[in-house]
Image: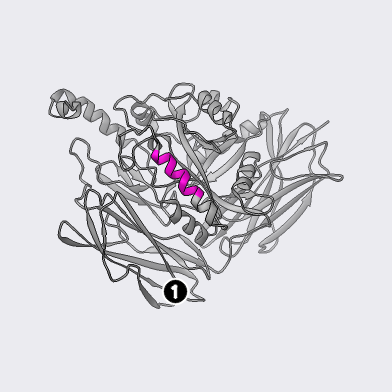
Amino acid sequence: MNHFLQYKSSSSLLPFIAISMLVLVCWRVYCYAEIHYTFFGYSIINRKYPEILADAPWRLDEGKSLPIACLVKDANIYPTKLRSIMASYSTPDGEIYRKQILSEKPVRINKHYWHTLAFLDIPKGAVGNIKVNVDMDFTCKGIKRKATSDNLPGLSHKPFNIFVSPYKLPSFDGWYYGDGHYHTHMSHNQVEFGAPLDIASEMGKAIGIQWVIASDHSYDLDRAMGKLFEHDPKLPRWQKLHDDAKIINSKDKEFVVLPAEEVSCGNYKKYNIHLIALNTSQFIPGKGDGVKRGLNKRPDLSLRQCLNRINDQDGFAYAAHPEEGNGYLGKLLLNRDYWRNPDYDQGGYTGLQFWNGYQGKPFRKGYKKWVELLLEGRKLFVLGGNDAHGDFNRCRKVRYPNTKLDETYDHIFGKVRTYANCGGNLSQEGVLEALRNGRTIVTNGPILLIEARRGNHSADIGEEITGKIQEIKIKASSSKEFGPIDRIKLYKGDCVEKVEKVSRVFIPEKDEYELVYKCNINQKNRGYIRAEAFSSARGYKYMCMTNPVWFRIV
């Protein structure tokens, strides 16, 4: 007998239902919203038609075509006839343009996940903010319906706001932008799902980024296709992620996908924490906080065991949003926690992804911990990403599972970018080596490089120089989109005295978008230098931080 059905009507199950609902409420979510999962029949957001969403990038380089995506999920449960998809947009001068994305013939959809991608030509000279409406007409169960932007209950359905920039993202030769934390449609569970890599790659190119880390949840990658709880030992989702990445990497010379895994593992207190595993060839299990095993939330592997598996495959790992837990209830009910000091103290990981879409308390705590580790002499690097699940323009997510949806702008694909020195042409190997060796900076606006020189020797970001530094070269770049450089801070860390101080502050006398400074600092002990740049424009503040250059006094 099915035990779920056997106990469903039993009053003895009420405590389990209450606890499980609290577990779901504590689940931190940034994603396309799953609305069809019901908990023992409970859901006030469930609808008897598939989820239908459109999406568009938040930013577009002038002269590029605008990608518009349309996604349909769960049409295998609710077969649907998609009759039309009409995109219309208005430019800053008030002109209105329309384009039919579907052909005249309706599309019948009866699969779990369906998507299409179209491109709109934006008139030359149409720069600034444009508004894009996407109207989708569909029929389900004989009822004709219309969705604007999406058909998710309780949301705004407002147009997509896209900034068409006349300025390319600031750039240096040999460096490439990427998003260090993204989820595809293989991250599909009771509250969320993402968008396929072919959509992400086109959205990325429109925004101006060239690579992405596709880090799907370990607790989703071992599930059967289209199923929430059914385990499949053949790992079709994990294989699909890697197959899709191979297709894009073999065909697209302008975009690189790094297939990865966001592994749930156990911290030293045996709570679940997350780790981004890169360059691994085998799946690493981690179901602890995926709510797949009833009340069993124990980690499958400890952090140490997980790191050993990654390193044994010649992989490497970054701590994923290490200071971002789920509060007291999340710890109690999801068994989810943040990284603790004994976890940070372990060796075998490469860095910390503490800039996770926004600069709130988890960012500040992660930043502080990173500096502490640097002062201990640890060569650990910062990685930036957004934890977006699709979410190319705004985040439409579950706020309270089965109860309420919400829209935010905190975890949008490509907003926080990692800029990688690939030493030449863009390639999967080049990006991986840059991430492994810390030849990266992280920004949401301007960019900044530092170089240390001693005689004929030099060290760039992520490298070490032997002996006292004789000259430091600082190079910064911004654009009118992100505003002129307001100031640059140069930090010096002393790994013997365990103190980091601002060594220099550079404030331009006038608006400058390209800056070069040369200076030197006092050095007594082994340590490092790093730098930060700041700018502002259009009511927004922007920041860039470099990874360190280390120096060793002999």
Q: Position of residue 97 (x, y in %)?
A: 38, 75
Q: Which residue sits at x=43%, y=74%?
A: 91
Q: Residue furthest right?
A: 455
- Secondary structure, magenta segment, majority class: helix
Image position of 540 (left or right of 528): left
The residue at 28%/71% (across/down) is 104
Q: Amino acid at mark 1?
A: Pro
Relative depth, front residue between 43 and 538? 43
Span highlighted in magenta in the image: 236-246
Q: Is residue 368 magenta?
A: no
Tell me which corner region of the image, top left, top right, bottom left or bottom right, holds residue 453: top right
Relative horizontal placement of residue 101, taking residue 509 as reference (left or right): left
Query: What's the colour scheme?
Result: one colour
Residue 216 placement: quadrant: top left
The answer to whether residue 136 is left or right of residue 237 is left
State which quarter of the image contains the N terminus: top left
Would residue 234 be found to the left or right of residue 8 on screen? right
Image mark count:
1
Q: How many residues crowd around disc 1 within 10 Å: few (fewer than 14), some, or many (20 or more)?
A: some
Rendered location of residue 395, percent (x, y): 38, 51
Image quarter of the C terminus = top right
| Residue 242 is a magenta residue | yes
Q: Nearer the viewer, residue 384 or 112?
A: 112
Residue beneath label 1, please? Answer: 92
* Image coords of residue 464 (percent x, y): 75, 38
Residue at the image position 33 percent from the left and 24 percent from the top: 296
Q: Secondary structure at mark 1?
A: loop
Relative to 515, does residue 329 appear above or below in the rendering?
Answer: above
**Is 153 above or below relative to 261?**
below
Image coordinates of residue 269 in percent, x first then y, are 46, 21
